[in-house]
Image (tube, rainbow, N blue to C red):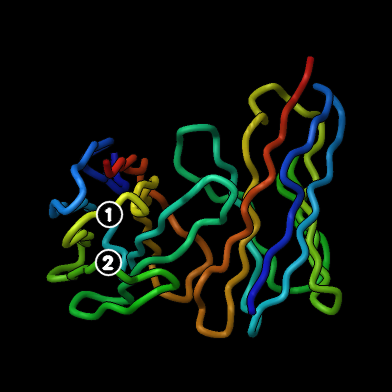
Amino acid sequence: GQNIDQPTEMTATEGAIVQINCTYQTSGFNGLFWYQQHAGEAPTFLSYNVLDGLEEKGRFSSFLSRSKGYSYLLLKELQMKDSASYLCAVKDSNYQLIWGAGTKLIIKP
Amino acid sequence: IAGITQAPTSQILAAGRRMTLRCTQDMRHNAMYWYRQDLGLGLRLIHYSNTAGTTGKGEVPDGYSVSRANTDDFPLTLASAVPSQTSVYFCASSVRGDDTEAFFGQGTRLTVV
């Protein structure tokens, strides 16, 4: 079956760095996505990786290793507004998104 | 403001009743999707449409139906609601079915009692 694994919850301190890991087993691979979802709101797109390596976008970076079925989202200079759930998703061979359950990130002052 | 609009925002529905969740987008996106989100589970695809006039089944289609008469609208119908359909429902769209980014509506919180 298809599976996306990510930690359920993480806690970090304002101003610090946090890395959220995601491992996947899917039938085919057509890209990996990270979305941010604040409580009670819709998911919003953060990043997309289809080739191995690091993609940097401001305070957020996303890394992919296709051979290891592994990705991480790196958040730097954490702000209180970064408290949210972070969703990892993979597009399979049919271009359908398979979603992880999300990682709830709690930022403490 | 361009985007996706879902209605209603929330609804309490008696079991056995029929209900249609509405979704409209004004971005002229070809592909549209319906997901449900339940605590502890990832978003699960119910139905999708890659272009007007076509629809397909996702991971959890049973008890739900959709139609795509035009580009903008993608309603989701529960023919006879059951308590297990209590969930938050998100409509989303993307330029194409294989596109990189999906845009989500604000969600409909449905409670079936």
Q: Is residue A87 left or right of residue B44?
A: right
**Of helix, strand and loop, which one carries label 1?**
loop
Q: Is residue A26 above or below residue A102?
A: below
As shown in the figure, which amino acid type bears the numbered disc 2? Gly
Labels 1, 2: one chain: yes
Q: Earlier in the sequence, mark 1 or mark 2?
A: 2
Q: Nearer the viewer, residue A2 or B93?
A: A2
Question: Mark 1: few, some, or many residues within 10 Å (few <14, many ≥20)?
Answer: some
Q: Residue at x 28, y 44 (%)?
A: B112
Q: Residue at x 22, y 68 (%)?
A: B66
- Indicate the position of residue B4 as horizontal and vertical percent values: 30, 48
- Indicate the position of residue B105 as horizontal and vertical percent values: 35, 46
Q: Is residue A67 left or right of residue A94?
A: right
Query: Which of the image's four quarters has the N terminus of chain A?
Result: bottom right
- Indicate the position of residue A62 as horizontal and vertical percent values: 76, 55
Residue tagged by mark 1? B82
Question: Mark 2: few, some, or many residues within 10 Å (few <14, many ≥20)?
Answer: few
Q: Quadrant of residue B52?
A: bottom left
Q: Residue at x 40, y 69 (%)?
A: B60
User: How many numbered discs sit on the rendered protein?
Assistant: 2
User: Chain for mark 1?
Assistant: B
Q: Nearer the viewer, residue B79 or B74?
A: B79
Measure the alpha-carbon separation of dots 1 and 2. Answer: 9 Å
Q: Nearer the viewer, residue B25 or B63?
A: B63
**Of helix, strand and loop, which one carries label 2?**
loop
- Indicate the position of residue B106 as horizontal and vertical percent values: 36, 41
Q: Residue at x 53, y 66 (%)?
A: B100
Q: Is residue B7 above or below residue A52?
A: above
Residue tagged by mark 2? B63
User: Chain for mark 2?
Assistant: B
